[in-house]
Image (cartoon, rainbow, N blue to C red):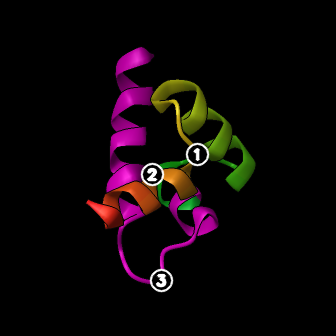
Amino acid sequence: MTYLTGWRLDLAADLLLEDGATVASVARAVGYGTPFALSAAFKRVRGVSPAEHRERARAA
């Protein structure tokens, strides 16, 4: 289960960097029922929210 969660969040991290991607659209694409569920899992596993991830990646 850990592998699957990691894979889904890796995919979500990539999708979040696409123009026009929303947390809701990414959540649906990677199999989370709600944007909140994706955000909570993302923060728990990666230590940052999806929005923070997007900001840091664009700043780099």
| Residue at screen point 44% across, 60% down | 54
Disc 2 residue type (three-letter): His
Find the magenta span and give its range: 1-27
Q: Position of residue 23 (x, y in %)?
A: 59, 62
- Relative vertical location of residue 4 with respect to residue 37 in this rendering, above or below: above
Disc 1 residue type (three-letter): Ser
- Identify the residue under disc 1: 49
Alpha carbons under labels 2 and 3: distance apart = 15 Å
Q: Position of residue 4 (x, y in %)?
A: 39, 27
Image quadrant occupied by the N terminus = top left
- Identify the residue under disc 2: 53
Residue 47 placement, left or right of 58: right
Residue 9 magenta-drawn? yes
Q: Pick out the residue farthest to the left.
A: 60
Disc 3 residue type (three-letter): Gly
* Snapshot quadrant of residue 15: bottom left
Q: Pick out the residue farthest to the bottom.
A: 20
Say if mark 2 contacts mark 1, CB within 8 Å.
Answer: yes
> Which label sits on residue 20?
3
Q: Earlier in the sequence, mark 3 or mark 1?
A: 3
Q: Earlier in the sequence, mark 2 or mark 3?
A: 3
Q: Is residue 23 visible?
A: yes
